[in-house]
Amino acid sequence: MLATYKPLTIRNWVTDLLFITIALGLFYLVWLGNHALFTPDEGRYSEVAREMIITGDYITPRLNGIAFLDKPILYYWLQASAIKVFGLKEWALRFWPAFMALFGCVITYLAGRLLFSRRVGIISAIILATNPLYYGAAHYANLDLEVAVLISNTLLFALLALQATSNRQRTIFILLAYLFCGLAVLTKGLIGLAFPIMIIGSWIVILHRWSLLSKMRLLSGACIFMILTVPWYFLVQQANPQFFHFFFVTQQFERFLTKADFNNPTVAWFYVPIILAGFLPWSVFLLQALTQQIKLVWQNRKQHQATLFLLLWVAIIFIFFSFPKSKTVGYILPLFPPLALIVGNYLNAFWDKPKSKGILFATLSFIILCLAVIIACLLVPHIKTLEIAHGIVPYLNDTAVIFLLGGVIACYLLYKNNVAKLFSCLTFIAGAFLLTLLASATILNQKTVKPLALQLKSVIAPQDEVVTFYRYYQDLPIYLERRITIVADWHAPDILHNDNWVRELWFGMPFQDTTAWLIGEPVFWQRWNSDKRIFVLMNAHDYENFSKKTKAYKLGEYNDVTLASNKITT
């Protein structure tokens, strides 16, 4: 049975969209620039955008002057536009992730409302906005959230088109799906196309709805897709002849199909705890919601076509990312919009029927969660074997108070068994916890070198050289607003087998001459002993040995990073 779009007044649409945009917008924008850039991702990708503006080259991304062709171009264009408009500020560098997160919530509301009901749309948007992984990604300047939203929008608009009852609606929605599909491919590569093909194709095969292929505007869609994607891929290949092999073979296929040495090798079930923890507190409903929706689809898949689509979406992406050895937490973000819709639809079914075992189970689970969080927050500061960041204890205490309040309210609701009040309670607790977590980001960020970079920026002259010694601090170039020299063994035989910053830069070395700033230790000592003023940053432990070899003037230290110079500097 196709979805029937119920008549909706303009007033209701405007009211809902204003509520979602303003309320969630404020929720996402507060403290956006509260903390320094996290490394490696925030420093790395933001520096690529900054160098794009400085060089005027908007085709070949560069990191510290080196071709950085791991990812396509759209994210860097967005970051560069934020820097151009707002300046080089931390909140500006996180503007687009926050905006895309909000946009994803709005599209999730739209899909929930048209496919199910107004209440499902609102509930799903709030669920999506208030889980830790999605919220955290919205405040983290890398590609994961953007590509997740673009893939999700592709699939949601495709589903709306496939379920539409009028040609006009179908045309608008399917063309929007092609638009977002092209943008996804321009952000992260082939997965932006692979997921829609696999999910939509499986859905059509299971339902035997082959006639829909003739209504999907394949020719128009292909034109939109090609216009969006082909120009940049063609131009970057012209500028960098090795690009296609490096990008498609090394980065796209080998990472997935082989056991090559890529980052974060881990177990197949890695994403199970990530989803359960990242979707809190709403994961207390996941088991019941998935069980109920699977049962409905199993009984009559033609009557629950939209739900079948969402379940296929979850299953296919989960299996796809569980297969390769290399796994990163943010990869699983495209699952969260369909999970929000599934849970939102489940809660809607019991909104006015509170006497449900599933709701009781969820309430009890949340009470247990509150107790666990409270105990953890109280015990962690007293466990001597744990190294917790200095100043984090007040935030742990705040978190304990938040969950204590949530547990007390949940105990009361366990007696009342009221779905609407339980949903309000979870929303309040999730929002308060996420704001507390964001406020503590300054304490949690222990790897930034921002204080040393700002100290150095106040005394450095254009002719001085900044060097990192067997380290690369990813946020140093962007805070200094200049390229730095890096000392490493660039001819080591094991570079290819270590997925780290050395290999990351080494991959880009063939695209230009880097001998001036990617240097070995002999060249470094020649420069250090010259008349030129050199500033060097290194690990504090390494500095002990370094200072025994030569005369160095220590200028500062932050966490485990030391700043020194070969000349006296005031």
Image: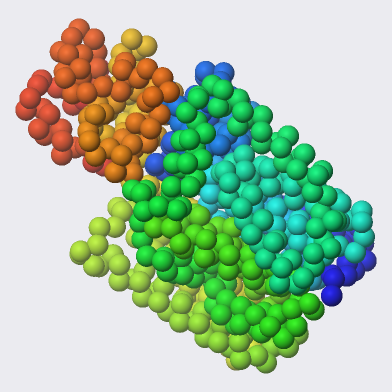
Position of residue 74 measured from the top left corner of the image (x, y, whole percent): 61, 36
Given residues 557 and 109, the one toward you in this image is 109
Where is residue 506, by image quadrant?
top left
In the rendered image, the vertical position of residue 499 relative to residue 375, given as above or below: above
The answer to whether residue 67 is left or right of residue 85 is left
Residue in the picture at 90% in, 59% down? 11
Residue in the picture at 24% in, 17% down? 534
Given residues 183 and 568, the one toward you in this image is 183
Residue 28 in view: no
Where is residue 293, by image quadrant?
bottom right
Residue in the picture at 41% in, 66% down? 268
Most distant residue in the left direction: 548
Position of residue 124 measured from the top left corner of the image (x, y, whole percent): 69, 66
Position of residue 35 measured from the top left corner of the image (x, y, whole percent): 45, 43
Residue in the picture at 54% in, 73% down? 283
In the rendered image, the vertical position of residue 121 relative to residue 139, given as above or below: below
